[in-house]
Image (tube, rainbow, N blue to C red):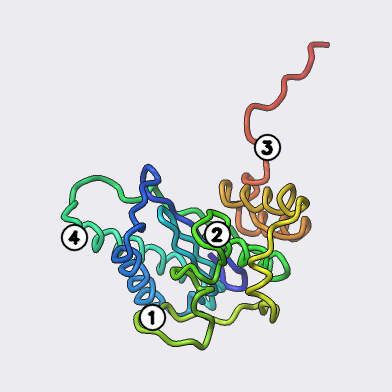
């Protein structure tokens, strides 16, 4: 992942098992994430959210390929610690597979992703307000302190002053139909998320053109 772009990274547990439902498991992940950020601060962690069976991370790296190093160390170390804590070594894969990621334009599209990530617990019905969820960057804003808490880097697109209330606002019908659909497609396929021209340029530069092509077999032409 080259520097100069923002990135969303996600991984889900194998079988979508809720391995982070217990507080001790969530705290262990958060401590490991904090250590990962301390090891590689150049990755520029801008936002994160831990859910019962998956996690979201958003980066704005200052160096090429540093995000891959952080996520590799985080995933490996967290898996080892979880297995040791539960005495489940040798029980198979903890995650579905390799993490998913996509680049994000550093404009309002990044704010859309940040809102999506930090609003996740509210959308899932786990809390009445997104800020009440303890396992996300929304609970600890930049500049706040806390033991074993991941350091948050400045976002290249600052959040508005009314960010907390904005995150809690329900999505409009247009956002559900268009923006959220595009965002979920980017999560599944790894295609860039941004304005159309930017998407084409970045897809070509990062060799992601295949993520923009329609899936499935091409239509058969009628016989002449």
Residue 2 image-quadrant placement:
bottom right
Image location (x, y in percent) of residue 195: 76, 59
Real-space Cα separation, disc 4 to disc 2, in angstroms? 29 Å
State the CA–CA distance, disc 3 to disc 2: 28 Å
Which residue carries the number 1 mark? Answer: 38
Q: Which mark is residue 84?
A: 4
* Residue 122: % across, % down: 56, 60
Give percent across and percent down for residue 75. Answer: 35, 61
Front residue of 122/155: it is 122
Q: Nearer the viewer, residue 141 or 157?
A: 141
Compute the Cα span from label 4 to label 1: 23 Å
Instruction: Answer above or below: position of 42 versus 125.
Output: below
| Disc with the residue nearer the chain's start (3 vs 4) | 4
Tell me the residue that label 2 is attached to. Answer: 120
Q: Is residue 10 above or below residue 2?
A: above
Name the residue carrying label 3.
214
Q: Are marks 3 and 4 in contact (CB under 8 Å)?
A: no
Is the residue marked by circle 3 packed among few (<14), some (14-19), or many (20+) residues within 10 Å?
A: few
- Which dot, 4 or 2, sits closer to the camera? 2
- Within 10 Å of disc 2 (Cα), the crowding (few <14, some 14-19, many 20+) is many
Comparing 184 with 40, the one in front is 184
Instruction: Quote the CA–CA distance across marks 1 and 3.
Output: 40 Å
Image location of residue 193, percent across then percent down = 67, 58
Give the CA separation, mark 2 to mark 1: 25 Å
């Amino acid at each position: 992942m080259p520097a100069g772009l923002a990135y969303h990274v996600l991984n889900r547990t194998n079988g979508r098992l809720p391995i982070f439902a217990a507080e001790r498991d969530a705290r262990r992940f958060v401590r490991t994430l904090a250590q990962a950020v301390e090891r590689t601060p150049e990755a520029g962690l801008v936002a994160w959210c831990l859910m019962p069976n998956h996690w979201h991370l958003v980066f704005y790296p200052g160096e090429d390929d540093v995000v891959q190093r952080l996520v590799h160390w985080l995933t490996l170390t967290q898996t080892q610690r979880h297995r040791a804590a539960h005495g489940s070594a040798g029980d198979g894969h903890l995650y579905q597979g390799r993490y998913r990621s996509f680049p994000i334009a550093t404009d309002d599209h990044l704010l859309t992703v940040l809102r999506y990530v930090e609003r996740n617990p509210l959308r899932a019905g786990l809390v009445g307000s997104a800020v009440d969820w303890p396992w996300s960057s929304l609970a600890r804003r930049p500049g706040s302190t806390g033991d074993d808490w991941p350091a948050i880097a400045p976002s290249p697109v600052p959040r508005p002053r009314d960010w907390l209330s904005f995150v809690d606002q329900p999505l409009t019908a247009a956002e559900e139909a268009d923006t959220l659909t595009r965002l979920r497609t980017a999560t599944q396929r790894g295609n860039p998320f941004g304005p159309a021209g930017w998407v084409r340029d970045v897809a070509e530069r990062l060799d992601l053109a295949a993520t923009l092509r329609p899936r499935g077999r091409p239509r058969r032409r009628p016989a002449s």
